[in-house]
């Protein structure tokens, strides 16, 4: 299979700085997180591997120099088996910085190395979706959320038995598992699975608990305070250990995953850690130059408009964007200027503009001939 250009994979120019490469990798890594991406999981895993291979090369000065000079042939020898595999990836710390343990790093780790969770069987994980404003995502915020979930019955302590009295399940003899023998022709097949009667617990109630009707669980709503850090974006996950569904007696609870949804803003468009806004300016400001005040999320900033600025010119305010999660740095703000044409002019203003037009060689007789239709 033909390998794509590493710069193209990360969407950066060949002269990109290390910071620009890291920023692009961060954005793409968030996009192809297995629990967030809208793509097919296998497709997402392949794309995640592709961007990580490009990042492994371009963020390393030696490998990048070899790649720039000799292409893919120059860096394949740097990989253990002659081509990239996850054992060659040396920036796991960067992934942890991007996702953090609370942001689903474990999912990434399992995806990369095909490992299963070592957590004991217990309660199921729960998910809650939380909507926040861009300002809250900028500063960080504490939110109280209500989580409906199943908890162990307080009356029977999750046993399902009246007064908590249980005996060994008669069907599985307390093992929690049953063997099913199936005969097919001259062969027999033995399958081992969880006991249906005790649901794999090995315990059975002689009399069902009247509170939970023998299920051992009751539905309750928990109120949890969640500290949302600055820099989260739509799709970011916060993991709250033990706040999910209750496990059985002696088993751990599941975890709660809080998924962020940042509402659209009336002034800014967010792209990763960067913010983009449009700022109207007058004809005189564009032609003569001016210094204008720009609102950012935490303060006022000033932008110098040089004389002769054209519509759609973009100005960059470094470090005025969103905080970058788990980092001390911030993204940038990009201000695109739009020419605001006045719809009402005084007679004096009209005369000034006519004289200006004449100096540019425009036909005076044609000025003002077209009237607004009523």
Image (cartoon, rainbow, N blue to C red):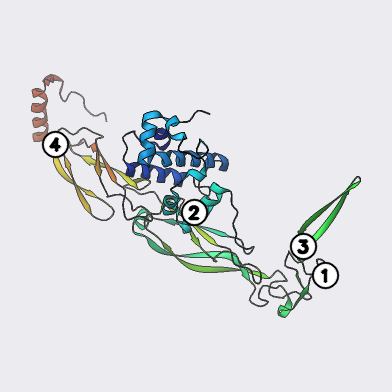
Q: Residues within 10 Å of mark 2 (few under 14, many from 20)?
A: some
Q: Earlier in the sequence, mark 2 or mark 4?
A: 2
Give the residue pinned by disc 1: 170
Q: Mark 2 against mark 1, which lies toward the viewer?
A: 2
Q: Are marks 2 and 4 in contact (CB under 8 Å)?
A: no
Which secondary structure, mark 2? helix
Q: Earlier in the sequence, mark 2 or mark 1?
A: 2
Quadrant of res 169: bottom right
Measure how far apart labels 2 and 1 are at the Cα level: 43 Å
Q: Position of residue 45 (x, y in %)?
A: 53, 42
Q: Earlier in the sequence, mark 3 or mark 1?
A: 1
Q: Are marks 3 and 1 in contact (CB under 8 Å)?
A: no
Measure how far apart labels 3 and 2 are at the Cα level: 33 Å
Residue 24 seen from this side: yes
Give the residue pinned by disc 2: 105
Q: Which residue is depicted at the point 39% across and 33% down? A: 67
Which secondary structure, mark 1? loop
């Amino acid at each position: 299979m033909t390998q794509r250009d590493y710069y193209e994979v990360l969407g950066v120019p060949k002269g990109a700085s290390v910071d620009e490469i890291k920023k692009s990798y961060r954005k793409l890594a968030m996009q192809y997180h297995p629990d967030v991406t809208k793509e097919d999981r296998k497709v997402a895993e392949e794309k995640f591997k592709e961007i990580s291979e490009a990042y492994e090369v371009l963020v390393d000065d030696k490998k990048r120099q070899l790649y720039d000079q000799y292409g893919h042939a120059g860096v394949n020898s740097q990989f253990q088996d002659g081509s990239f595999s996850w054992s060659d990836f040396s920036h796991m710390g960067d992934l942890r910085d991007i996702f953090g343990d609370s942001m689903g790093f474990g999912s990434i780790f399992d995806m990369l190395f095909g490992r299963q969770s070592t957590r004991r069987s217990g309660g199921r994980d729960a998910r809650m979706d939380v909507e926040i404003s861009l300002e809250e995502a900028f500063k960080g915020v504490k939110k109280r959320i209500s989580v409906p979930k199943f908890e162990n019955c307080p009356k029977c302590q999750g046993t399902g038995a009246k007064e908590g009295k249980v005996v060994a399940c008669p069907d599985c003899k307390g093992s929690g598992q049953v063997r099913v023998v199936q005969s097919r022709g001259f062969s027999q097949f033995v399958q081992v699975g969880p006991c249906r009667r005790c649901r794999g617990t090995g315990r059975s109630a002689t009399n069902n608990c009247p509170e939970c009707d023998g299920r051992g669980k009751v539905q309750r709503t928990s109120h949890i305070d969640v500290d949302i850090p600055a820099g989260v974006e739509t799709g970011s996950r916060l993991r709250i250990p033990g706040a999910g569904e209750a496990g059985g007696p002696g088993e751990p609870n599941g975890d709660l995953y809080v998924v962020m949804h940042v509402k659209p803003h009336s002034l800014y468009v967010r792209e990763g850690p960067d913010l983009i806004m449009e700022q109207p300016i007058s004809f005189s400001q564009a032609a003569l130059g001016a210094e204008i005040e720009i609102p950012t999320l935490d303060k006022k900033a000033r932008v110098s408009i040089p004389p002769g600025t054209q519509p759609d010119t973009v100005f960059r305010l470094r470090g005025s964007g969103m905080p970058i999660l788990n980092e001390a740095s911030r993204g940038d703000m990009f201000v695109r200027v739009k020419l605001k044409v006045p719809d009402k002019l005084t007679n004096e203003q009209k005369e000034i503009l006519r004289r200006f037009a004449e100096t540019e060689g425009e036909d005076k007789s044609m000025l003002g001939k077209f009237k607004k239709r009523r």
